[in-house]
């Protein structure tokens, strides 16, 4: 481990020291967790699992240690406020929903948001005004929300208390956050960006600007997705001009565990310090590896590989390796199964799209092997080309009948799938990934949505969160005035 940046990661330094003391027998914990680092009980899985309290520091000193680390992270981005999370971007999104308003307040929300944003509305009692990205017709991918779309929504709803946007999207397309920030600033409301997939943005000139640097008032990122941090590690940063510091603190605390993993916190701190110290070197090498893989895969007839030049003025995360299969005729689910049998596990696979998640941990040899096996497997499954279409997650249209919180707590009943159109959803149902709900609490269930879920299921997608994952029934609100 390089010593040149470790001193800029106080939590990781504390974890390294704790591990050394445990191995030498100097530290004899009479604290949780109950495994006490004894690998004879359940095996090596407990190795490295150090708690924050009583692990990284004595209980009375641990909070101050975390605050020092978070202050350094905030300074790097020019933020007034920063918190680390061991609950992923889900925790950050839900906390920011609690921080921006009061129950009953209106907020403008990107309808292609992750499930965690929509359930944040439930927790906070907020009422959404949905806005939608446009679709890039040649690829079927969502473009970032347009500033004019958000401006129109705010003009139509001057009572709105905040704007929630997702950028980058799951597939790497980015909104013009600077233009969005101009709109929200003029309206006097905070711009909240779910950048779960964008912790690496702004760390190389060939990457899109970090949403916070572009002017967002609060940004959630998952360090565990694109940086070398442990699973569930996330970061939330904010400006406190339009967001109250005490509300931010309370919202994060009320939704957080009181037994945070010191290992996860230390890994966040280390990932941020490492990539701050060596950003251009590390991400320059990553971008070069992804580009070489694209060059190999472009030799496959019909295979489409978007990059930064694909979307005109809309920025794209060029570190994202995305394979669009429709015009090859290959079925992505079949390709994924063969890849799995060969030992390759992809982040996402559906009929028309493959997303192998490439990070700093992937070297040149691994990337060459991946490109070769992808090319040969797609060729083996080549079929009749299909029309290019947008994933249902990017085109969902929502009619909000009840506030999400009201629908969540309403009496509900399972309704046969064939009888559900016209009813009001009482649950979240989403093809996963990308985790964008096609049904959400309080929305009118439509035939189009039901058909889209059925198609996703028949194409082999995982249907997540549904009370009945077989899709034989859907949970609907028992009775709504004016409805069935």
Image (tube, helix red, strand yellow):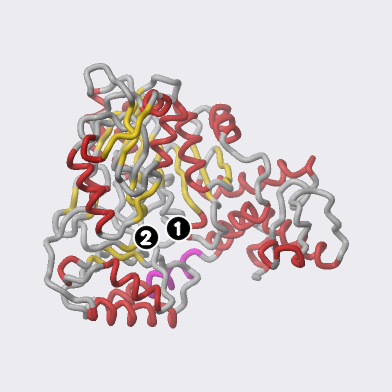
> Tags 2 and 1 in contact by the CB under 8 Å rule?
yes
In the rendered view, tell whether residue 401 sits above or below residue 52: above
The residue that disc 2 covers is 207
The label number, if any, that marks residue 200 in the structure image: 1
**Residue 74, how many percent across, how many down?**
56, 45
Q: Earlier in the sequence, mark 2 or mark 1?
A: 1
Q: Position of residue 382 (x, y in %)?
A: 19, 76
Does 286 lie within the magenta span?
Answer: yes
Magenta stretch secondary structure, dominant: helix
Quarter of the figure with residue 287: bottom left
Query: What percent of the width, then of the height, locates residue 159?
Result: 32, 19
Residue range of the region highlighted in magenta in the rendering: 279-289
403 up-or-down from 307: above or below: above
The label number, if any, that marks residue 316 in the structure image: none
Q: Position of residue 20 (x, y in %)?
A: 79, 65
Name the residue rendered at 57%, 62% in the picture.
Answer: 274
């Amino acid at each position: 481990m390089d010593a040149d940046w470790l001193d800029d990661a106080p939590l990781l330094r504390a974890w390294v020291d704790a591990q050394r003391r445990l191995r030498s027998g100097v530290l004899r914990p009479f604290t949780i967790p109950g495994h006490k680092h004894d690998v004879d009980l359940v095996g090596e899985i407990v190795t490295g699992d150090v708690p924050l309290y009583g692990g990284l520091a004595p209980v009375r000193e641990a909070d101050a240690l975390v605050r020092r680390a978070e202050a350094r992270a905030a300074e790097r981005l020019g933020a007034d406020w920063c918190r680390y999370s061991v609950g992923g971007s889900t925790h950050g999104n839900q906390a920011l929903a609690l921080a921006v308003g009061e129950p009953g307040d209106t907020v403008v929300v990107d309808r292609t948001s992750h499930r965690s944003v929509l359930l944040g509305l439930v927790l906070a009692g907020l009422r959404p005004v949905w806005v939608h990205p446009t679709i890039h017709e040649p690829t079927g991918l969502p473009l970032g929300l347009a500033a004019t779309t958000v401006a129109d929504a705010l003009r139509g709803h001057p009572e709105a208390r905040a704007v929630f946007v997702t950028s980058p999207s799951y597939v790497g397309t980015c909104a013009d956050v600077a233009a969005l920030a101009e709109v929200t600033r003029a309206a006097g409301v905070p711009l909240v960006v779910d950048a779960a997939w964008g912790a690496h943005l702004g760390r190389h000139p060939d990457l899109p600007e970090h949403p916070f640097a572009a002017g967002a008032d609060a940004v959630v990122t998952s360090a565990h997705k694109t940086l070398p941090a442990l699973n569930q590690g996330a970061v939330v940063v904010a400006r406190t001009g339009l967001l109250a510091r005490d509300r931010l603190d309370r919202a994060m605390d009320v939704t957080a565990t009181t037994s945070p993993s010191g290992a996860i916190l230390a890994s966040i701190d280390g990932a941020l310090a490492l990539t701050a110290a060596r950003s251009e070197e590390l991400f320059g090498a990553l971008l070069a590896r992804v580009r070489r893989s694209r060059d190999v895969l472009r030799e496959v007839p019909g295979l489409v590989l978007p990059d930064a030049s694909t979307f005109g003025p809309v920025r794209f995360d060029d570190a994202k390796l995305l394979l669009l299969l429709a015009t090859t005729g290959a079925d992505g689910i079949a390709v994924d199964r063969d890849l799995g049998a060969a030992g390759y596990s992809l982040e996402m696979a559906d009929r028309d799209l493959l997303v192998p998640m490439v990070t700093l941990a992937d070297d040149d040899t691994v990337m060459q092997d991946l490109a070769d096996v992808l090319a040969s497997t797609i060729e083996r499954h080549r079929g009749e080309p299909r029309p290019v279409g947008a994933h249902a997650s990017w085109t969902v249209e929502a009619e909000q009948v009840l506030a999400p919180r009201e629908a969540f707590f309403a009496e509900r009943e399972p309704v046969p799938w064939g009888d559900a159109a016209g009813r009001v959803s009482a649950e979240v149902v989403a093809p996963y990934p990308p985790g964008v709900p096609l049904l959400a609490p309080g929305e009118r269930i439509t035939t189009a949505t039901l058909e889209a879920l059925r198609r996703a299921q028949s194409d082999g997608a995982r249907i997540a969160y549904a009370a009945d994952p077989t899709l034989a029934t859907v949970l609907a609100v028992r009775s709504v005035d004016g409805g069935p």
